[in-house]
Image (cartoon, rainbow, N blue to C red):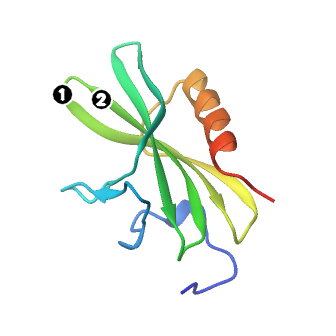
Amino acid sequence: MRRSAFINPWKQSNLPKSIVHDAAHVAPDNQWFGERLDMDRDYADAHYSSLFVEDRKQGMAGLELHRACAGQKARVARILFWDASGQFSVETFNYEVPLDLLEELITEVRTLVKTK
């Protein structure tokens, strides 16, 4: 249930456990993972992959960008479409994300998430 007509995408660090997708599951560290999509490649010293996320209760769907480097895995960015605002938002999580990868992720999410 939405608490307001507008959901601030910048304050979603504690998303409820209602993020669902056919292939979604929760990792032990409460990071949300979905089905692996197009981006699955090396860039500089790290490996990047995109994962689909969706929360029908919150009214959002999009992609997360995950990075694996030196044995460490982290969610570094996400692009979400919010039904309430009718817009995409980009969020990074204290990591520098190469612009090439963000542009590729934007292309991928616009193809995947159909908007009216």
Q: Which residue extends farthest front? A: 22
Task: Tell me the SS state at disc 2.
Answer: strand
Callout 2 amino acid:
Ala
Q: Residues within 10 Å of mark 2 (few under 14, many from 20)?
A: some
User: Residue 56, relative to residue 64: is it above or below?
Assistant: below
In the displayed structure, does residue 52 sit left or right of residue 73? right
- Check disc 2 and report the residue beneath it: 68
The tag on residue 25 is none
User: Residue 44, relative to residue 77: is it above or below?
Assistant: above
Q: Residues within 10 Å of mark 1 (few under 14, many from 20)?
A: few
Q: Quadrant of residue 65?
A: top left
Residue displayed at 26% across by 36% down? 73
Callout 1 amino acid:
Gly
- Check disc 1 and report the residue beneath it: 71
Q: Which residue extends farthest top? A: 44
In the displayed structure, does residue 106 sit left or right of residue 13? right
Q: Quadrant of residue 16?
A: bottom left
Residue displayed at 69% across by 53% down? 88
Residue displayed at 40% across by 27% down? 48
Query: If the image is split into quadrants, where does the N terminus sit?
Result: bottom right
Circles 2 and 1, Cβ within 8 Å, touching? The answer is: yes
Determine the CA span between mark 2 and mark 1: 7 Å
Residue 80 placement (x, y as % from top left): 59, 54
Residue 79 placement (x, y as % from top left): 58, 47
Residue nearer the viewer, 36 or 99: 36
Task: Tell me the SS state at disc 1.
Answer: loop
